[in-house]
């Protein structure tokens, strides 16, 4: 028995250790490429989520309103607010102090106050003391002071004292900012919300889906099941594949010169946006639908033919139902692309300042990605967290759509 | 330092065996592809592996240079000793093993490089030539041994893929012997070739066994009879029968072997 | 006279009409794709012709001064010296080039890792995760580039003693590059798997390590396909709009310096059409001339890229 190195080990081939180190470096480069790409994605999401946090929550303060003052001043809202603030805060003795007091609550707080009191009157009566207790949203300045635990920087000495007093008496509460999801756009970051944009996006997506799903599926059926193989259909195919790679902004130019200038459709309307996006997503849906049709086994068609079904009956009664989940998956993925698309919408005038949600597809509308763009371009710093929050909402929608597509695909796979 | 303990009792039966295969089973996931194979592969002889397709003969061949490592789900048990050393031992580096055990594939697969670079490639990566002259000499010698030198001597810089199928396969053989292996594995090397090219390769195999131990998988019994000294017959993952080629073909012991060589299964 | 039992009866002809109508519907639906292409080409060309009746074609394509805001209405005659698009072409090229510098190595190495090193299980996890990068809306990337990447690069630059513009080409380029990584990765993945396994086995059988096999055999064989893939990625980068609108410069500057602010073709299209100008002025019509240029360039890249990739794949069939 002797001990010696295994003749098939590294030791018997000089230079192999060096080659192994090169191997490790190469593999590491691959891991690094994947890891850093994914890390970038994680960084992007985390950075935006952190920036968005403030937009989803709001701070409110409990204000007491004397019934008699309400009855006396309700037709002069701003004076009513001033008197209410004087009643709630100590030391409002001069004009400067009054300005600081009014700045404690959100711009337009007088309207909120009056609304709240009207609601209170319908539901319950004022308490025995003859005063209402109303929660009013605080101004951005106070909110940022509260959320950063740093009362000193943006507030005057008087305001600091007031805030500390409120906090000490438990008059301040933190709430989920429902307004962000329901309000329309506003020049004032504290009031701006994505409500109208969500409605606009929904209308636009509806138009886009009806058009692109309908046309896309019919075109796919023709190309896959009926089209003869000749130079026209080859041209058609090349055409569709190339259309899928045309930059989105070009579709915007098409929408502008054809839908707006030629057909005279309204600018900024959901219908035009939906049509442009439908043209853009159609090639993707056609390609996905054809794959779905291809995956239906030939035996199904042969079975249908063998009982005397016509080609059309075969496709619509037997093949289409089986291919439909795959087509739906493709459509959902197409819609996921459409919902985040911005550039072509700018071309058809969809960047107007729109507060009200549209009532129908012909009304001027704003959509979520454009709202994000508009806020991102706004010089006012308060919009930064709103932008981030709107992005988080958009990403959440995308996540839901993609998960739906994945689940649908998984279900489909089980079948065959 | 990795060390390896070996039993150096000079058993006269194992001395001339280059490779000793014992209790080898191969599974792809749940599917058992080879079942308890034992086979000695004799030095400087040609061993043919025959059997119907799907019988596991190629799988077995690929165990000998551990090409099966490339397939994640493939699990090999048992032992394969090369010169008495287990090739599946943990300290084995597959690159060294594959240098010792070369391989020629079913379809000629020259790299899309010049003829010269095709042969020089293995020599270069393993650092087997110290200078250009030595490399040139190795390339020439390999081409000569593969019987290709005269045909391509004046155009070593043309692409290997521009040669005819038979020439490509001989180029692949030259590529394999350039790194001076002990064993050459051939996986149906003539299945894609015409009869004349096949005859050349068979002649070459005959010459090569002077220097190398050759294991050849073939689906052609005539070829096995022509080129091999020993034959092993595989059937559905089992090694049914092994022995000297002449004996196995004229006087098979097992019914399945007989059925195969008379053409009743296959 | 009796009809052959295999011939259809008269009542079937109604069915025939319906079937014919449905088929016509199907054909019409597929024809829409052609209609869209025709629509794009015509609308771009018609408006471009109107633009070039006011601005000389030569000035547009080779001029180096871009300042459409200084157009003054002279009434009749050609406008000159303000619609020179060269700075835009250079800016577009610069940013796309930076994007490819990022997407190329990361995409190629990801593809190599996925196809050669990651097992099936890891691959099934990592591939869709990478695809998320391509699914993030570009407006999100634009915001991220402007708010997070640009200030950081600026800070880094000044720490190293470089003067980096607020809207430097490099910020937009990097973010755009990250967006294209999945595209490059999936094309290269396809191209690598089209390299015949026998070639790979030839190298492995000689005792080459995995990385030697990739570097010496697979990559050289896959090179034409990878080049085609990079052309497709370039087409994507050139046509990208939101990232550059939000993170690149608005004013034209003829510069190859990645630390300076340059503008691109797509940015100028957006700027031309989102102002309050009259639709018929040269200031807005220029968007269509730029759009036509963009369409031609991306179409050429795509056709060429697809042709190379397909020809390469066929070579190994």
Image (tube, coloured by chain):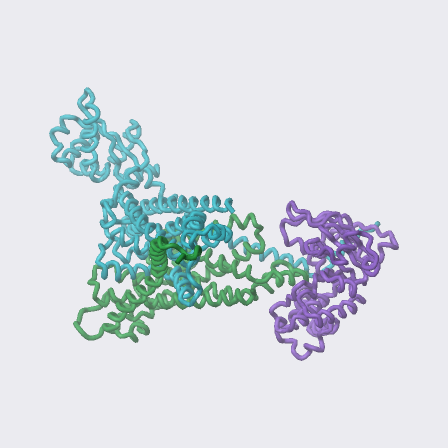
Chain colours: A cyan, B purple, C green
Toward the bottom, the furthest residue is B154
How far from the left and from the top, in percent, is residue B1?
Answer: 74, 52
Q: In the picture provided, is C187 more to the left or to the right than A387? A: right
Out of B145 and B230, give the one closest to the viewer: B230
Quadrant placement of the C terminus of chain B: bottom right
Out of C73 and C191, give the one closest to the viewer: C191
Toward the front, the furthest residue is C1
How far from the left and from the top, in percent, is residue A255?
Answer: 28, 59
Please report the residue visible at 64 percent of the width from the left and 46 percent of the height from the top: B29
Q: In the picture provided, is A307 more to the left or to the right than C146? A: right
> Can the viewer see residue C95 in this picture?
no
| Res. C248 image quadrant | bottom left
| Res. A194 image quadrant | top left
How far from the left and from the top, in percent, is residue C85?
Answer: 31, 69
Out of B35 and A126, give the one closest to the viewer: B35
Toward the top, the furthest residue is A128
| Res. A5 image quadrant | bottom right
How far from the left and from the top, in percent, is residue A144?
Answer: 31, 40
Please report the residue visible at 43 percent of the width from the left and 44 percent of the height from the top: A403
Vertical order, B155 against A197 (above or below): below
Q: In the picture provided, is C43 more to the left or to the right than C234? A: left
Out of C129 and A97, give the one closest to the viewer: C129
């Amino acid at each position: 028995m002797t001990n010696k190195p295994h003749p098939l080990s590294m030791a018997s081939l000089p230079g192999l250790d060096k080659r192994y180190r090169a191997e490790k470096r190469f593999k590491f480069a691959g891991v690094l490429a994947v890891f850093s790409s994914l890390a970038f994605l994680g960084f992007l999401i985390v950075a935006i989520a952190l920036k968005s946090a403030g937009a989803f929550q709001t701070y409110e303060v409990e204000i007491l309103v004397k019934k008699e003052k309400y009855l006396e001043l309700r037709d002069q809202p701003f004076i009513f607010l001033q008197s209410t603030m004087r009643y709630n805060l100590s030391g409002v003795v001069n004009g400067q102090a009054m300005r600081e007091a009014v700045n404690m609550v959100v711009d337009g707080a007088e309207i909120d106050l009056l609304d709240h009191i009207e609601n209170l009157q319908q539901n319950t009566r004022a308490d025995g003391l003859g005063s209402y207790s109303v929660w009013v949203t605080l101004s951005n300045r106070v909110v940022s002071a509260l959320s950063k635990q740093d009362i000193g920087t943006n507030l005057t000495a008087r305001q600091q004292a007031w805030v500390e007093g409120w906090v000490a008496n438990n008059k301040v509460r933190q709430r989920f900012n429902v307004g962000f999801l329901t309000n329309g756009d506003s020049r004032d970051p504290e009031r701006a919300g994505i409500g109208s944009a969500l409605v606009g996006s929904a209308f636009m997506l509806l138009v886009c889906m009806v058009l692109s799903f309908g046309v896309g599926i019919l075109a796919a059926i023709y190309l896959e099941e009926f089209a003869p193989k000749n130079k026209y259909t080859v041209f058609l195919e090349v055409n569709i594949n190339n259309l899928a790679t045309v930059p989105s902004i070009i579709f915007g130019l098409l929408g502008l010169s054809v839908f707006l200038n030629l057909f005279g459709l309204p600018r900024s309307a959901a219908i035009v946006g939906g049509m442009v996006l439908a043209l853009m997503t159609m090639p993707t849906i056609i390609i996905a639908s054809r794959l779905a049709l291809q995956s239906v086994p030939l035996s199904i068609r042969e079975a249908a033919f063998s009982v005397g079904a016509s080609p059309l009956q075969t496709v619509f009664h037997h093949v289409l139902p089986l291919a439909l989940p795959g087509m739906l998956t493709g459509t959902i993925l197409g819609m996921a692309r459409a919902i985040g698309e911005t550039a072509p919408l700018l071309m058809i005038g969809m960047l107007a300042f729109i507060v009200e949600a549209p009532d129908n597809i012909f009304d001027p509308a704003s959509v979520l990605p454009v709202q994000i763009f508009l806020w991102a371009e706004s010089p006012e710093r308060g919009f930064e967290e709103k932008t981030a929050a709107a992005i988080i909402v958009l990403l959440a929608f995308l996540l839901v759509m993609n998960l739906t597509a994945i689940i649908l695909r998984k279900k489909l796979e089980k079948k065959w | 330092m990795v060390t390896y303990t070996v039993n150096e009792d000079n058993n006269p039966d194992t001395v001339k065996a280059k490779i000793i295969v014992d209790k080898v089973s191969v599974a792809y996931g749940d599917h058992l592809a080879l079942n308890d194979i034992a086979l000695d592969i004799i030095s400087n002889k040609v061993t043919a592996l025959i059997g119907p397709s799907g019988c596991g003969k190629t799988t077995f061949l690929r165990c000998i240079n551990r090409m099966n490592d490339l397939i994640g789900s493939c699990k090999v048990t048992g032992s394969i000793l090369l010169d008495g050393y287990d090739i599946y031992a943990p300290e084995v580096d597959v690159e060294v093993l594959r240098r010792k055990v070369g391989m020629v594939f079913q379809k000629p697969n020259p790299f899309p490089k010049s003829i010269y670079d095709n042969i020089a490639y293995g020599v270069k990566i393993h650092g087997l030539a110290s200078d250009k002259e030595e490399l040139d000499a190795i390339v020439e010698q390999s081409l000569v041994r593969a019987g290709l030198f005269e045909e391509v001597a004046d155009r070593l810089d043309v692409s290997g893929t521009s040669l005819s199928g038979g020439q490509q396969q001989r180029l692949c053989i030259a590529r394999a012997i350039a790194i001076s292996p002990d064993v050459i594995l051939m996986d149906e090397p003539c299945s894609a070739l015409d009869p004349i090219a096949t005859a050349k390769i068979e002649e070459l195999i005959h010459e090569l066994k002077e220097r190398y131990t050759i294991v050849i998988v073939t689906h052609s019994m005539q070829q096995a009879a022509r080129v091999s000294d020993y034959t092993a017959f595989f059937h559905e993952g089992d090694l049914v029968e092994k022995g000297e080629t002449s004996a196995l073909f004229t006087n098979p012991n097992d019914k399945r072997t007989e059925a195969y060589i008379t053409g009743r299964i296959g | 006279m009796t009809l052959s039992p295999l011939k259809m009866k008269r009542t079937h002809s109604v069915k025939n009409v319906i079937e014919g109508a449905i088929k016509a519907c199907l054909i019409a639906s597929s024809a829409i794709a052609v209609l869209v292409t025709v629509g794009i080409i015509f609308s771009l060309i018609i408006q471009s012709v109107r633009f070039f009746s006011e601005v000389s074609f030569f000035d547009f394509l080779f001029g180096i001064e871009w300042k459409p805001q200084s157009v003054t209405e002279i009434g009749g005659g050609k406008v000159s010296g303000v619609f020179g698009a060269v700075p835009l072409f250079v800016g577009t090229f610069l940013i796309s080039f930076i994007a490819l510098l990022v997407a190329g190595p990361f995409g190629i190495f990801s593809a190599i890792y996925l196809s050669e090193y990651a097992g099936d299980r890891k691959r099934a996890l990592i591939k869709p995760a990478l695809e998320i990068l391509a699914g993030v809306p570009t407006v999100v990337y634009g915001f991220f580039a402007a708010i997070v990447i640009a200030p950081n690069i600026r800070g880094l630059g000044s720490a190293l003693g470089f003067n980096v513009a607020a809207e430097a080409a490099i910020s937009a380029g990097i973010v755009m590059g990250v967006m294209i990584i999945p595209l490059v990765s999936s094309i290269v993945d396809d191209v690598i798997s089209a390299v015949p396994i026998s070639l790979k086995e030839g190298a492995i059988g000689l005792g080459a390590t995995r990385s030697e096999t990739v570097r010496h055999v697979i990559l050289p064989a896959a090179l034409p396909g990878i080049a085609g893939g990079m052309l497709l990625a370039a087409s994507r980068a050139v046509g990208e709009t939101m990232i550059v609108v939000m993170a690149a410069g608005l004013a034209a500057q003829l510069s190859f310096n990645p630390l300076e602010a340059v503008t691109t073709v797509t940015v100028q299209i957006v700027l031309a059409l989102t102002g309050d100008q009259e639709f018929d002025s040269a200031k807005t019509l220029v968007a269509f001339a730029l759009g036509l240029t963009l369409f031609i360039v991306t179409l050429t890249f795509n056709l060429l890229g697809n042709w190379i990739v397909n020809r390469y794949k066929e070579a190994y069939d």
